[in-house]
Image (spheres, coloured by chain):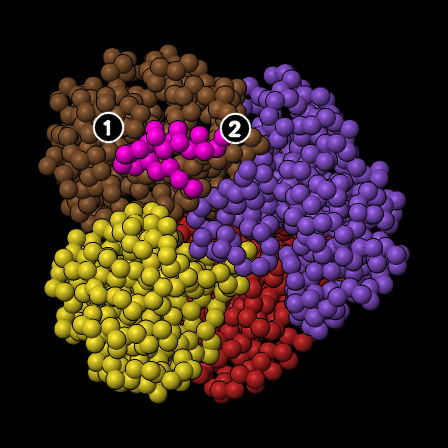
Chain colours: A purple, B brown, C yellow, D red
Amino acid sequence: MATAAVVGVNGYLGGELLRLLSYHPNFDVTQAVSRSQAGRTVGDALPQVERFGDVVLAADPEKLDTDVAFLAQGAGEAMAIVPSLLARGIRVVDLGPDYRLPQADEYQRVYGRAHADAEHLGEAVYGIPELFGDQVPAAKLVANPGCYPTATLLALAPLAQAGALHGPIVVDAKSGTSGSGAQPSQSAHHPEAALTVRPYGTPEHRHVPEMAAAFGRLGLGPVPLVFVPHLVPLVRGILCSIYAPGDAGTDPAKWAELYNRRYQGSRFVRVGGVPRLPWAQGTNRCYLSVDSAGGAPVVFSAIDNLGKGGAAQAIQNANLMFGFDESAGLAHPGYGV
Amino acid sequence: MATAAVVGVNGYLGGELLRLLSYHPNFDVTQAVSRSQAGRTVGDALPQVERFGDVVLAADPEKLDTDVAFLAQGAGEAMAIVPSLLARGIRVVDLGPDYRLPQADEYQRVYGRAHADAEHLGEAVYGIPELFGDQVPAAKLVANPGCYPTATLLALAPLAQAGALHGPIVVDAKSGTSGSGAQPSQSAHHPEAALTVRPYGTPEHRHVPEMAAAFGRLGLGPVPLVFVPHLVPLVRGILCSIYAPGDAGTDPAKWAELYNRRYQGSRFVRVGGVPRLPWAQGTNRCYLSVDSAGGAPVVFSAIDNLGKGGAAQAIQNANLMFGFDESAGLAHPGYGV
Amino acid sequence: MATAAVVGVNGYLGGELLRLLSYHPNFDVTQAVSRSQAGRTVGDALPQVERFGDVVLAADPEKLDTDVAFLAQGAGEAMAIVPSLLARGIRVVDLGPDYRLPQADEYQRVYGRAHADAEHLGEAVYGIPELFGDQVPAAKLVANPGCYPTATLLALAPLAQAGALHGPIVVDAKSGTSGSGAQPSQSAHHPEAALTVRPYGTPEHRHVPEMAAAFGRLGLGPVPLVFVPHLVPLVRGILCSIYAPGDAGTDPAKWAELYNRRYQGSRFVRVGGVPRLPWAQGTNRCYLSVDSAGGAPVVFSAIDNLGKGGAAQAIQNANLMFGFDESAGLAHPGYGV
Amino acid sequence: MATAAVVGVNGYLGGELLRLLSYHPNFDVTQAVSRSQAGRTVGDALPQVERFGDVVLAADPEKLDTDVAFLAQGAGEAMAIVPSLLARGIRVVDLGPDYRLPQADEYQRVYGRAHADAEHLGEAVYGIPELFGDQVPAAKLVANPGCYPTATLLALAPLAQAGALHGPIVVDAKSGTSGSGAQPSQSAHHPEAALTVRPYGTPEHRHVPEMAAAFGRLGLGPVPLVFVPHLVPLVRGILCSIYAPGDAGTDPAKWAELYNRRYQGSRFVRVGGVPRLPWAQGTNRCYLSVDSAGGAPVVFSAIDNLGKGGAAQAIQNANLMFGFDESAGLAHPGYGV
């Protein structure tokens, strides 16, 4: 049993961490932080979670003394506290963007602010266990990936590693509104979100450099990505439709074989028919299918942005860091309907 | 004032025709056909429409004697009656697929049945007035295009006619569930459609040959299209996200100028910022924006699949055929919210 | 032709007024006010409306000089400007709550602020034309009713006027999220609104005193109402389910007759089978059905909260005030699907 | 460990049973039946469930030999097989309506067919453990209640048992579309369900006699219920708003105390603030709040129709029948968002 802290309880990722940890056999949440709800309890903030209900929300992470801290905050917040946490021997899974890019100058370009902790930038492990899992167990600091990169990289890795990605790859992503956060906003206001599909993020979404960096970490050259996310009237879930013309040949059976082989034995990545989001919602699973459209491969990738694209993958990383079963607390299937 | 008949009242396109015609200043619906509801009235079938409420639904179109007949039926049905309608001097706007492909053998390949009226196939005008409008006024028979081709062709025509389309064009289409028709089905069953985004139509949707034919009608060579439609949890509306690498250069301002020039003065095509479906729902409008993603043009195209992608465009065609104002009965804006 | 001003363009009621007025044959919007968007045009704020696109939004209503002003603002705003508007001879339709209650002290109790224009409170006409229509033509100031009272009062008037309402009447109202306004809020945040039904407004919603006052205006004694509104995952529309035990007997046919007779010849109230909201959405119509449940009458009442429950009814009132056809600009049917 | 069979895998309740049992520590599903999918496996029918994936679906229940059988079928099907199952020593939890009414003639009146197994009608235990839990452990046959009765009876029992229910009680129920089953239908067709709230079931829904019988089982006299269900555009969940004028006094604090006391220590019924359906979706929980509206109590009751209103409650019953922990496999919280 290890002790855990959740920082940022008020956001959807923080809430999802607590929900998932509430039935985790190996982690016990003993501390929690929420600036906006300090003084209230986890039970006040998330009545349905029940376990950890008496944990009082602290205003800041100064007094954390758990084995691991899950940081679910916006850009710029983690890097202000990670040095202190690491110095105190607390291992960190950061669900925000601060440690996802390997270079401080790239971070500054993308997020518009100087990086305050360049020292640890290089030692952060990019936490997609299916791709970089061997680095996770020893990590002191895991940069938990963005939801879009998780869905995209798991979908493209088999073709990329087979050397079959050429020409521009088009990633058309459809995301539920929980991805835009718990803070009410114009674009997620129900009357404006419920009856439309809203493309955004052009000309370059912040997750594109993160994906480029990940291809680099895989030892691959640059992959020209055209990535456009869309808000769809769902709450949870991302479906990426990925169009990959290239040198993959024209035989769908061969592509399927490539994917089946790559993810054989994976605890969380499933290769099969066209995925349905309700299989993935609430879980740590990624459902992939590879099909042919217009003679080229199209890969469909389905995850829960708060699950495999967020809190569940963070717990998967923590499981590996602490030597627990990789799927501890994460084995449950999606609702289906 | 011209008299009109609607065949296929029970479907969503038939209903939309009657709704739109109920405030049309120049058409009077005097006859209507519905096999499944024969003997009932338009008022029984569509209580909210009110005008034409007393028109009794006939079981078949044998006794039609109107100036124009709108046919809103499935594949194979129009070609069985069009020869007789034309012979009796009734002009036809066919909202089904029977006359959209110029070649009978292509029709057989795509729809799996022999074409029963090859004679009129060649004289049918493909009814996107913004692209082929000069042919519509004299037409006896208009093949009203599919919803996906309407959204796609209006979006691609400016780049195509500028010779700037090369390499595979990716069309990722998101459609509301009314596009799958009024007949209950597994894929449009609310519990299975409301919480997901469902790609379908691979490896080749039926609308791809229709789009290829349209490029031919425009005098253009083959455009390699990768087209994948998705069902999203909306009722009305299609948003196409179209990725068009090629020789378009890299200056978004030039692309915008191309689109603005092409559709200047258009009554129904609007070029501007990223479109919202509630602007288009219920209307004959197509909202286009052209943007840059990953250095290449991405075009967003928003229509109502039952409106500009169906019944409203059919009425626009009929307006032209009968010399009425092109926007008669079609000028109303979308709800917005 | 009369000139009109819309004050509060940025809200949903303001937008709906402009949408509906854009195809009104007798009103021309020549001025518009929006504090938050002053300096922009109607075309910037509502691109889909197109007519009136060049009208520049003023920051305040000081320079209005139209024949009629539609005020679509929150509590407390109308009463600050109505005296000046009336003094300048501008007739007013107020879509906010300031003039709906006949007594200043009641207003203070319900809205928590003193009424600033008690003088005109008494002369405001409560604008449900089907119930108080004879007072509207001569009115200088119409208090356009709230959406819930409109749906409820039209549904209860026939039974109430027949003296058949006794015992507590239960009004269970289900409203789309546009009723909560254009300002993003926690309760209308898509991730929190899309998967639930949220009751609110207990122990007493602000619209209850408004309904009590309306029964008084009808010359009826107090009707004990239990009114609970619920937010449902729709954008537009209210369905009220009204349970009315009492002395109505037990014969549904008699109730239906009562309703048919009461609304015979009405331009906008329809009595028939169980209503569907898509018949009412976007329109000025109220669809009523009366049925039996557990031996007592249950009345279902469907309107669009922005339509008959707001902007459309405001235009209906203005039509009567200016001697135009009552249904000018308001005759269109709902989408149905 | 006990062995279990699921009959009716193809429906939503059957699927939910398998999903929930897939992480149950004490039940192992060794047999499953689906007429329409016989020969396929559980893994084919429900790919996301994974456990039990190799179990082959039988066409009929003749060869069942498990410890317990969960029957998730329509009216008339369970009574045809229950005698044989019981004779073979298989304990039964029937999720259909066949054993919910205590009298054969009442069954015939409500379901329009003679009851084929009157013998076991009297010995079936009505399975709401919070109300009739002492009878469940020894039961051979449990009639798992309908979703509406579960939500309603849990909400009304405290007031009813306190003798405070008089006058007509109004139950306005809002249900997600999964309640109407997996079979596509007009009323759950997405284009017709997504934009409306549809009342149905008047003048008397089939669940009313079931609720009346349950009040009888509680030793209470007749409670005059006015019950009207509505389909709302949700997939999972029921919210009942229950208006209960009577002798309950006017002090909300007293009502709350009554509810808190009644459900103190309950594993699955939670009394608190206004419930949110995402707390209940996917779970066996019932969230209750009691409030005041118009001076009388209004009780809000939230469950998942497939969970506490169906499959989860069936498992709770089975837990009690087999002496397992009441919450085995049922402890997980809802998603919240």
Report the front residue among A94 and D53. Answer: A94
For the magenta stretch, what is the residue range? B251-273
Residue position for label 2: B250
Element at label 2:
loop
Q: Chain of mark 2?
A: B
**Residue D335 at x, y percent in the picture:** 63, 56
| Label 1 Cα crowd, 10 Å radius (few <14 / some 14-19 / many 20+) | many
For the residues beneath circles 1 and 2, the answer to whether they share a chain is yes
Q: Is residue B3 left or right of residue B135?
A: left
Please name the amino acid that badge 2 sits on. Answer: Thr
Q: Earlier in the sequence, mark 1 or mark 2?
A: 1
Q: Is residue B266 magenta?
A: yes
Q: Is residue C8 magenta?
A: no
Residue type, mark 1 in image: Val
Decide: marks 1, 2 in contact (CB < 8 A)?
Answer: no
Looking at the rendered image, the disc whose residue lies closer to the viewer, 1 or 2, is 2
Which quadrant is home to the N terminus of chain B?
top left
Q: Which mark is residue B93?
A: 1
For residue B73, above or below residue C206: above
- In front here: B269 or A310? B269
Q: Is the residue marked by circle 2 packed among few (<14), some (14-19), or many (20+) residues within 10 Å?
A: some
From the viewer's perspective, is A98 left or right of B100?
right
Q: Nearer the viewer, residue D321 or D114?
A: D321
On the picture, is D225 further left or further right than A175?
Answer: left
Could you tell me which residue is drawn at 56 percent across and 61 percent down?
D277
